[in-house]
């Protein structure tokens, strides 16, 4: 986040970490004039702080978001937004009551290839979507020995939330009807949670498939194939950072020249959208109400994988396995 903010010229005035030495280390690296705090409440008391980026893990984050909103700060929440859809809805209501914006750091929306595809769909260049097929093959073994390795539904929750969010963008106002998903461990994977997952999402007149393999040792590949009534869009490449996009119509094929990369430019995108929305007195495109639709897809997929039964988005209100 700080790498992107420094490159963008954003005015970061304070850093907070309960381990003060870590905050001081980041200050020395990025913003030497920033204040540092070990207690977030001291930071929230500052009248000159207008926007807070909350990048903790989900368990601690809801309380921090609520405190920031009550202090009338605009908030960018790290993803996944919440562990409970009802808590998320309550935070959205609180933001509206306080007159501040609550956005979610779905940085994948600003990956160059994703940004092109979602804007092309929104502009009607594909007509109406009839199918979306998204597949990711990568090596997620870096989580071994980290707290992420303890997350049972790591792929479908912490990672795939980006792709559920992409579906929310691509299909717009069209509401998904049901979700079916399955997960499995591979023969050679090192992480504890299952690294294989596939998901089928039914829409009124379309389908979407998601396929994940987080134990791909070599030959990494990411692919998106969107079929519309008027055109087809394809994005593929050896990684999330390197993608080639094609827009295929009856007249021919267009290949736009993409600029930037998912990391770190996506973090610039999420914050810049929030800052522009505040300045222009509008709702940011990555607002939390919209993100709850993406989480509803993710929770439905995880619930389906647990029960081996299709689920309706919104039916599973809380991340399965999380106590009230």
Image: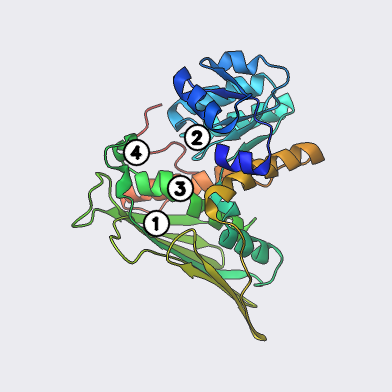
Query: Where in the figure is residue 173, as x and y percent of width and height?
Result: 65, 55
Q: Residues within 10 Å of mark 2 (few under 14, many from 20)?
A: many
SS for callout 3:
helix
Q: Is residue 167 visible?
A: yes
Q: Are marks 4 and 3 in contact (CB under 8 Å)?
A: no
66 up-or-down from 108: above or below: above
Q: Of the numbered discs in the image, which one, if any, rests on residue 148?
A: 4
Q: Are marks 2 and 4 in contact (CB under 8 Å)?
A: no
Q: Is residue 219 left or right of residue 82?
A: left
Q: For this rendering, which residue is in front, 66 or 272?
A: 272
Q: Of the numbered discs in the image, which one, if any, rests on residue 82?
A: 2
Query: Where in the figure is residue 266, as x and y percent of width and height?
Result: 58, 49
Which of label 1 and label 2 is nearer to you? 2
Q: Residues within 10 Å of mark 3 (few under 14, many from 20)?
A: many
SS for callout 4:
helix
Q: Are marks 1 and 3 in contact (CB under 8 Å)?
A: no
Disc 1 or 2, which lies upstream in sequence? Answer: 2
């Amino acid at each position: 986040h700080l790498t992107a903010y420094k490159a963008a010229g954003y005015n970061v005035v304070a850093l907070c970490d309960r381990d003060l030495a870590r905050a001081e280390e980041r200050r020395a690296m990025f913003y030497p004039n920033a204040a540092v705090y070990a207690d977030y409440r001291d930071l929230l008391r500052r009248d000159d702080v207008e926007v807070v980026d909350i990048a903790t893990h989900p368990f601690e984050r809801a309380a921090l978001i609520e405190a920031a909103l009550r202090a009338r700060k605009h908030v960018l929440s790290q993803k996944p937004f919440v562990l409970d859809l009802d808590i998320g809805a309550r935070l959205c209501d609180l933001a509206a009551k306080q007159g501040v914006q609550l956005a979610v750091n779905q940085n994948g929306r600003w990956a160059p290839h994703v940004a092109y595809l979602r804007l092309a769909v929104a502009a009607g260049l594909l007509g109406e979507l009839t199918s979306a097929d998204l597949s990711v093959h990568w090596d997620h073994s870096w989580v071994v020995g980290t707290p992420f390795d303890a997350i049972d539904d790591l792929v479908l929750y912490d990672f795939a939330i980006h792709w559920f969010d992409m579906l929310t963008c691509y299909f717009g106002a069209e509401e998904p009807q049901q979700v079916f998903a399955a997960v499995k461990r591979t023969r050679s994977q090192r992480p504890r949670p299952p690294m294989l997952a596939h998901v089928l999402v039914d829409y009124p007149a379309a389908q979407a498939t998601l396929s994940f393999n987080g134990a791909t040792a070599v030959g990494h590949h990411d692919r998106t194939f969107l079929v519309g009534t008027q055109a087809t869009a394809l994005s593929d490449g050896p990684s999330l950072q390197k993608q080639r996009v094609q827009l295929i119509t009856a007249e021919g094929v267009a290949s736009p020249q993409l600029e930037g990369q998912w990391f770190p430019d996506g973090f610039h995108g999420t914050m810049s959208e929030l800052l522009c929305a505040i300045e222009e007195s509008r709702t940011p495109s990555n607002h939390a109400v919209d993100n709850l639709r993406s989480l509803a897809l993710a929770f439905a997929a995880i619930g389906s994988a647990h029960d081996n039964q299709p689920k309706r988005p919104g039916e599973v209100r809380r991340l399965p396995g999380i106590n009230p």
